[in-house]
Each structure stands twice: as structure tokens, then as C-alpha cells.
Image (cartoon, rainbow, N blue to C red):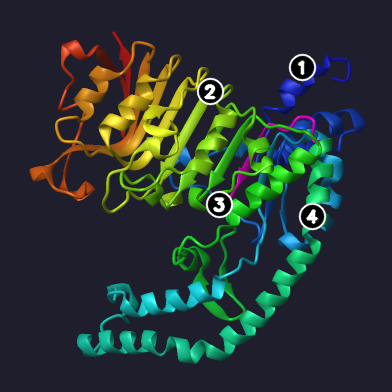
Amino acid sequence: MNSLPPEVLQNFAERLRPTDLRSLRLVDKTFAAVAARPLFEVIHFNGVPQQDRFPYFPEAITFDQKHIGPKRTVEYSQLHHAISEVLPLAPYVKTFIFSPFYYREGFWQDYGLYLASQAEEPVDPEDIPDAPEDYEDAVESVIQERLSRPEREAPLIEAGKRTWVENIAKQNANAQKVIDFLARFFEASKRLEKIEINPCEFEGYQGLHFYSFAVDSMRNDSSSTTVDFLDMLGTALQSVNRHIKSLCVTEPMPELINDTSANRHIFTGLTHLRLDTTHVEFMLKDAPISQNFVELFKCAQPTLRSLEIIGGGKWLQLPSTGEHSLLKMLCDGTPESPLVFPKLQRIYLCSLILSTPPLMKFITSQPNLTSIEVGFVFLSTPSFGWRYFAKSLPISVKSWKIRGRLGHEPIANRRPADPNWMREWIPSKDLLSDGAGWKITATRPFGVTAFRRV
């Protein structure tokens, strides 16, 4: 085996599962080196105890699950220690996933809002014990338990606040040290291509029972851990003059992103960009243009080949109402001037209610666009639904694909646009006309339908 060319050995190793790769490393030094490359190509700094959690939706998978790579449970303030331990692995890393535990400002104010919102939530049958003697009394008991929760939890909340403040102080004290160690890691990561930034999600804190994403949903656009992470990683990359090809950011919150040299650096040279956000209010038709985001997109303008914009967060939940425009962040000064990406070949849009004219204006402005994917997208403009979309695609687009439900044509021209008051579009039943220039080539499980130009 040792006489085989290195390329053959590497190809063999890349087909193995992580458990097999670990065994292969024990054979000898040659095979240890061969196994290291695929085994450590993904590294994940996570803020919660490690579990292999698989997404609910196939499109949410952002890296090859066969090579998940090593994970480290770490708080941001102690990140420099963890990086120093894994620094020898840096030359093998291609994908860097970043979601350390981070003590954000404003958390406890949001926790108070969360408790108040819980008291106003309707009582779910699952909250009531099986077969209560008096159902109304059982409902009232649940309501009273919720109302009394702030008072009952007061001592735990005060203790949690004190610890939280202490840890914020540690983060601030070690901030520069962490960035310096990140820079050392990136400088040694010669194969690094992709960075994925996620918020740290955790369950409970010092005896309090909650899910952090429920508390984070109370934010009044005042803070975002992923926005902070983006600036930190950009600063580290810039300090060693390293660029990446792919960036995936969850909850970017454009209204909080700053147009800094570090953020410009991390966007410069990107060929793939994925934005996954629950908060899509910044794209409402009446919202102002997200100018800082526009400037960052301009940094990726010459090189970007693939763009993914996903609403609803990890649950792929549609906004309740409203019409959204891509040109709120993909325009050049005014909504009438879409940004042009000369190398853009693929667009993926998911969980959005989109105004059709701005969508088509952006798509038709891309000279080399060849592929489009949409999932759980509802077109809100009356008489400009999916049949119009298909007929209006530029000749450069050779194929497009549907994942999940699509909707269009608001019923009774209802405003503001509401996905519950739109007609569902099912391609197999509402066929495109022959003049549209498209043919269904495949229909797969999970509602995937593919079209090619004819």
C-alpha cells in the first residue's frame, strides 16, 4: 500500500467514515498523514456540549456530514486556549464553523420580555396533565404558574445576572488575545476556503429553564452575536491578509452590520455567500435600503458565483405578512439600480414573500446567471405569479428548481400580503404554457421539481 501514489491513497481516505479514518491513523505515519486531511478538514468551535445534530431540511446542510471534523466546546473568553490546542490541525482545515458561547449584552432584559410573553401565550393541551378532573381549572393553573414565574425565578435571575456580568468582563479582557490566536490559526490554515458563523444556542442557565433562541427572538434589534463574530473573524483574517471563498452567516441582522474594513475584507473575493435570517423586516418594501450591507455586497461583486438568501432561520418559517424586496440590500444606490454580479451563476431563495418586479429586475440584470432554486417562496404581486416568473427568466438561465411549497396571486388582492391568503402553485397541476419555454425534467421526494429550458 505504501508504494501507491499519494493521490490514490488520498482518494481512498476521502471515501472513509470518520471512525475508519481514526483507525487508519493508527497504522503508521504515512497513513496517519493520509487520514488527517479528510478527518480534520472541518473544525467547529461550539458553545454547548457536543452532539451531532442534523438539520430538519436537506437544504440547511452546509457541509459534508461524512466528515464533520473535530468539535470543541468553548466559551469565547477562553477561545485562545482551545485554538492553541488545535493549532497543529490548522493546515488540514477547509471549513471553519464558529459558534462559541458568548455572553451578549442585553440578554437579561430580553429574558424579562420572554417571561412576559410566555404569560400571554395560549395554553397548549400539551401543557395540561393527562385527563384532568376539571379542564378549565387545569388551564387556570397553567396560567397562574406562568404569571408567578418572574417572582419565583427572581433569586436565580439575580445570580445569573451577576455571573453573566463577570463573564462579559472576561470576554472584554481577552478580546484582543482571542483575535490574535484566531489570526495565528488562519495564517496556518493554507487550505481554508469556508467560514460558517452561527449564533450559540443553549438550553437553560444556572437553574433557569428556557431555550436561548426563544429569548433571542425578543431582541429589539439591539445586539447580534453573529454580527459581532463576523467583525472578529474579519479582523483576524485581515491581520494576516487571508481571504476565503465561501461565507455562511446565520442571523446577520443587516441593520447592525457596520461597514468596517474588517467586514469588507471578509466579503472581498467571495465566490459563495449564504445569509440565513429569521428577521427579514429590513427587506420590507417600505424599509430603508440597508446601505452598509450594500457596500459589503459590492466587495464580493466581482467574484461572487453563488448567492443564497434564506428567511425564517433554521425552521424555514415564512414571514407572517409583508412584501419583501431583494433590492433593499442588492441595489446600487436606489431600488431602480440592481447590483450586477458579472460572475453570478446560481441563486437560491427560501422562505420569503417577495414582490415580483424587484425580484425579476435583479434576476434579469445578472448576465451569466444559469441556475435558480426557490423553496417556500410566495410571490405577492397580483397577476405576476410563477407563470410570469418562468416566462420572464433571461435566456442565460438554463434550469430552475423548486423545493417545497410555492404560492402566488393574493386572494381578493389582500394587503398586506399574507401567505395564508395566497393560492398555492403546484407545477404538476398548473402546467406552464408551451410558450414559457420550460419542461419539467424531474419530480423528487420532499416536493423537489426541476425544470430545463426547451
In this rendering, is residue 121 above or below 231?
A: below
Residue that appears at 31% across and 89% down = 141
Find out whether residue 18 is within the magenta segment: no
Distance, label 1 to label 3, CA atoms, is 32 Å
Along the viewing direction, whichever of 363 and 351 lies nearer the viewer: 363
Percent across and percent down for residue 225 are: 59, 57
Q: Is residue 405 left or right of residue 329?
A: left
Residue that appears at 37% across and 51% down = 281
Would you call the spot at circle 4 few (<14 residues within 10 Å), some (14-19), or many (20 or more)?
many
Q: Amino acid at mark 3?
A: Arg
The residue that disc 4 covers is 178
Q: Quadrant of the C terminus?
A: top left
Label of residue 53 in the image: 3
N-term-proximal mark, 1 vs 4: 1
The residue that disc 2 covers is 305
Q: Quadrant of residue 338?
A: top left
In this rendering, is residue 43 above or below 228?
A: above
The residue that disc 1 covers is 8
N-term-proximal mark, 3 vs 4: 3
- Look at the numbered discs 3 and 4 and tell me whether their residues touch, using CB distance below 8 Å: no
Q: Quadrant of residue 169?
A: bottom right
Q: Which residues are magenta?
A: 189-198
Q: Main secondary structure of the magenta part?
A: loop
Q: Is residue 237 left or right of residue 216?
A: right
Distance, label 1 to label 2, CA atoms, is 31 Å
Q: Amino acid at mark 4?
A: Val
In the image, which is nearer the foreground, mark 1 or mark 4? 4
N-term-proximal mark, 1 vs 2: 1
